Amino acid sequence: MEIKITKGDITKIKCDAIVNAANNSLLGGGGVDGAIHRAAGPELLKECRTLGGCATGDAKITKGYQLPAKYVIHTVGPVYYDGEHNEANLLKSCYQRCLTLASQYHCSHIAFPSISTGAYRYPTSEAAKVAIETIQEYAKDNHDIQCVEIVCFDDYTYQTYQKLIKE
Ligand code: ADP
């Protein structure tokens, strides 16, 4: 599996599935969630209404509608308090659940945003460590996903993930 760190807008990525950093309602929000709903069109919200929300650390899949991606995998990252409220395990679980769903739906190229590091205030360098370790761990036993792209929206996030992947 190739892990690629790129900079840009995840709604523009043409791949099998993009991941949405959603909230528990799955009914839309700000940040990457708002951008994905705007780009996908109102059909996405309609499908999300049928899902009954999503627990923190879990993930649910929908179609991509007007997005270039075929599917959207909606996951709910933890809100960061102090690092002692199970944040790392919950964030790890987000990546694991998304990768498992991507495998089940035969996705070979998937794109993640930096989950929880925006409105949910997870420190970027800690979140990046969890993200990369969990993806690498998954790749050891699973060979169906060929490319995982982490799409960073700003320079700081991009540099932080880049630094880790080079280590
Ligand atoms: P969370 O609530 O999980 O923290 P946010 O959407 O607030 O989710 O932020 C998660 C990350 O997604 C942040 O680094 C933010 O800058 C980034 N982001 C916002 N819009 C986009 C986009 N269109 N494409 C990729 N990443 C984005």
Image (cartoon, rainbow, N blue to C red):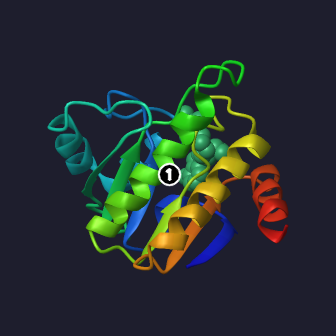
Tell me if residue 34 comes above or below residue 8 in the rendering.
above
Crowdedness near tag 1: few (<14), some (14–19) or many (≥20) residues, C-alpha within 10 Å = many
Tell me if residue 78 comes above or below residue 115 in the rendering.
above
Label 1: state its secondary structure.
helix
Identity of the residue furthest to the left in this view: 50
Q: Residue at x 85, y 62 (%)?
A: 163
Q: Residue at x 26, y 68 (%)?
A: 105
Q: How many marks?
A: 1
How far across and down, in percent of the image, does residue 73 sit?
Answer: 36, 53
- Toward the viewer: 54 or 104? 104
How far across and down, in percent of the image, does residue 90 sit?
Answer: 52, 35
Tell me if residue 127 comes above or below residue 13 in the rendering.
above
Q: Is residue 129 left or right of residue 42?
A: right
Instruction: Check the picture and name the quadrant holding the C terminus.
Output: bottom right
How far across and down, in percent of the image, does residue 109 sit?
Answer: 45, 75
Asked if ligand 1 lies within 8 A of label 1, the reply is no
Residue at the spot of label 1:
95
Instruction: Check the picture and name the quadrant holding the N terminus.
Output: bottom right
How far across and down, in percent of the image, does residue 24 sit?
Answer: 37, 28
Identity of the residue furthest to the front in this view: 141
Q: Residue at x 69, y 43 (%)?
A: 127
- Toward the viewer: 167 or 107? 167
Q: Is residue 50 left or right of residue 4?
A: left
Q: Residue at x 57, y 25 (%)?
A: 79
Ligand 1's quadrant is top right
Q: Quadrant of residue 3?
A: bottom right
* Residue type beneath disc 1: Tyr
Q: Is residue 31 visible?
A: no
Tell me if residue 52 comes above or below residue 105 in the rendering.
above
